Image (tube, grey):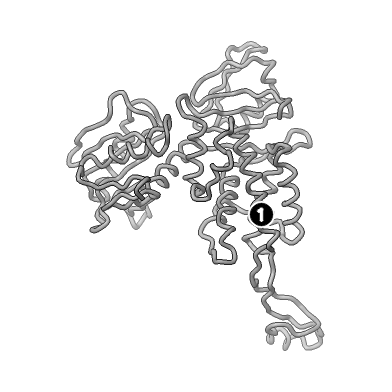
């Protein structure tokens, strides 16, 4: 990547780029494949007009051609180390102490990606030395000998067939747990974002897995709700890393014979996941946090509200307030206010909070009917844990007697 022209864009900050840095071919790829992530406009109507590029709510890296790539940076004030911290919390990686491996020393998201790829490869390699996880899988086959259970109905209909239709279980390592690893490593290799530092390790482990697993496409959801036991518990962090890669590696596009896959993070979604996971990881004495609660408002048409966060009393399980995360700056919109009021009414609580990543010049604090609507800030501009506890104190203001247990006392 050292010989590639890299154009850097910060979120929602228009930048003028001349035609020499961004050829027409690369601009056409941007408009065709990534128009929802990067706005591309011509400065004038002339044939040699420069471009104006504006990044939306995304960070990451987009390879356009073999000569040009786009690096999308977080908005001004958001530290790159906090972006890594958000990813750790959102994908359940915090407990695996990945930050101790120097991830926070990375300068860009590509560096972070490269080091994560190497960590995943090394974890898989460590597992291979102890043997990959096996399990019994049901299979059916026509065999010249008896194995497992015979399909008697088929055998009676075809008495001349000397081969028996048998149903049996096979002890194999070609299972979903290992197929997820194989598919993820293939996507990492296809992205061409690995450096020499990680490419050799990833390629070696991929070939080892491919020798005994079928190459089955795996969605990010396949990494969730898996069953672990003492024999495969070390797969848990590997699957968490696989989910991170699979969710943020975008659809491929081709330049000649070269296939290119972007690595992109939707900051609005990440902020929502991060705030929820950070709160669930803390101890709020007397309170519990529920994320993504659904409230059915019309059974006939299957209409429902999905609330980002609900703060409940741990004893009564009654909702104390609902919270909605908004990755925005500036004053709240009326639609956002209407949304949280509707949520509060539907769930039957009198407190509704809009959560923002930056401090508002004029914080929201108003009464609408019986609903108290206010804003709160979970800042991304300082240490995440310190910002998180400031946020907790802010949301629990109406219940000042709440006893909080900060991290050092947990």
Instruction: List the residue tagged with mark 1.
Output: 124
Give whichever of 285, 53 is nearer the camera.
285
Q: Residue at x 50, y 44 (%)?
A: 88
Q: How many labels were placed on the picture?
A: 1
- Relative image position of residue 348 (x, y in whole percent): 23, 50
Give the image quarter of residue 408: top left
Give whichever of 255, 199 is nearer the camera.
199
- Relative image position of residue 15 (x, y in whole percent): 55, 18
Q: Residue at x 33, y 30 (%)?
A: 333
Q: Residue at x 51, y 29 (%)?
A: 74
Give the image quarter of residue 29: top right
Question: Up-down: is 31 above or below 395?
Answer: above
For this orientation, the residue located farthest to the left is: 370
Instruction: Give the position of the N terminus as an image quadrant.
Output: top right
User: With 368 as the anchor, is 277 left or right in this view?
Assistant: right
Please tell me whether mark 1 sits on a helix, a strand or a loop. Answer: helix
Give whichever of 24, 146 is nearer the camera.
146
Quick one: label 1, few (<14), some, or many (20+) residues within 10 Å? many
User: With 393 as the anchor, is 128 left or right in this view?
Assistant: right
- Relative image position of residue 376 (x, y in whole percent): 31, 35
Give whichever of 20, 27 is nearer the camera.
20
- Relative image position of residue 262 (x, y in whole percent): 63, 36
User: With 153 as the anchor, is 271 left or right in this view?
Assistant: left
Give the image quarter of residue 211: bottom right
């Amino acid at each position: 990547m050292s010989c590639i022209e890299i154009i850097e864009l910060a979120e929602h900050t228009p930048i003028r780029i001349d035609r020499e840095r961004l050829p027409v071919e690369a601009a056409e790829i941007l408009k065709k494949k990534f128009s929802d992530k990067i706005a591309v406009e011509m400065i004038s109507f002339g044939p040699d007009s420069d471009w104006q590029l504006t990044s939306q709510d995304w960070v990451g890296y987009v390879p356009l051609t073999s000569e040009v790539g786009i690096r999308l940076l977080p908005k001004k004030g958001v530290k790159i180390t906090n972006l890594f911290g958000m990813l750790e919390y959102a994908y359940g990686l915090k407990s695996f102490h990945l930050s101790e491996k120097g991830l926070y020393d990375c300068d860009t998201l590509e560096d972070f990606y490269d080091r994560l790829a190497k960590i995943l490869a090394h974890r898989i390699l460590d597992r291979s030395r102890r043997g990959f996880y096996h399990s019994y899988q049901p299979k059916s086959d026509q065999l010249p000998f008896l194995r497992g259970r015979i399909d008697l109905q088929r055998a009676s209909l075809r008495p001349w067939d000397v081969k028996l239709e048998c149903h049996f279980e096979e002890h194999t390592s070609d299972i979903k747990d290992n197929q997820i690893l194989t598919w993820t490593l293939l996507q990492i290799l296809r992205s061409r974002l690995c450096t020499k530092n990680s490419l050799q390790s990833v390629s070696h482990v991929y070939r080892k897995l491919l020798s005994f697993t079928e190459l089955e496409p795996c969605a990010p959801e396949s990494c969730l709700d898996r069953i672990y036991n003492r024999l495969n518990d070390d797969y848990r962090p590997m699957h968490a890393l696989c989910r991170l890669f699979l969710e943020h590696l975008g659809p491929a596009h081709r330049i000649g014979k070269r296939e290119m896959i972007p690595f992109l993070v939707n900051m609005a979604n990440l902020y929502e996941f991060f705030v929820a996971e950070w709160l669930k990881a803390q101890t709020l004495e007397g309170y519990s946090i529920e994320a993504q609660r659904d409230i059915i408002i019309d059974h006939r048409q299957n209409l429902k509200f999905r609330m980002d966060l609900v703060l409940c009393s741990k004893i009564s399980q009654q909702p104390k307030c609902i919270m909605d995360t908004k990755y925005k700056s500036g004053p709240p919109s009326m639609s956002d206010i209407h949304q949280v009021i509707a949520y509060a009414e539907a769930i039957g609580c009198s407190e509704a909070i809009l959560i923002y990543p930056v401090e508002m010049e004029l914080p929201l604090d108003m009464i609408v009917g019986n609903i108290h609507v206010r804003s709160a800030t979970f800042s991304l501009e300082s240490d995440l844990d310190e910002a998180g506890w400031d946020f907790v104190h802010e949301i629990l203001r109406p219940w000042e007697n709440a006893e909080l247990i900060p991290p050092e006392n947990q």
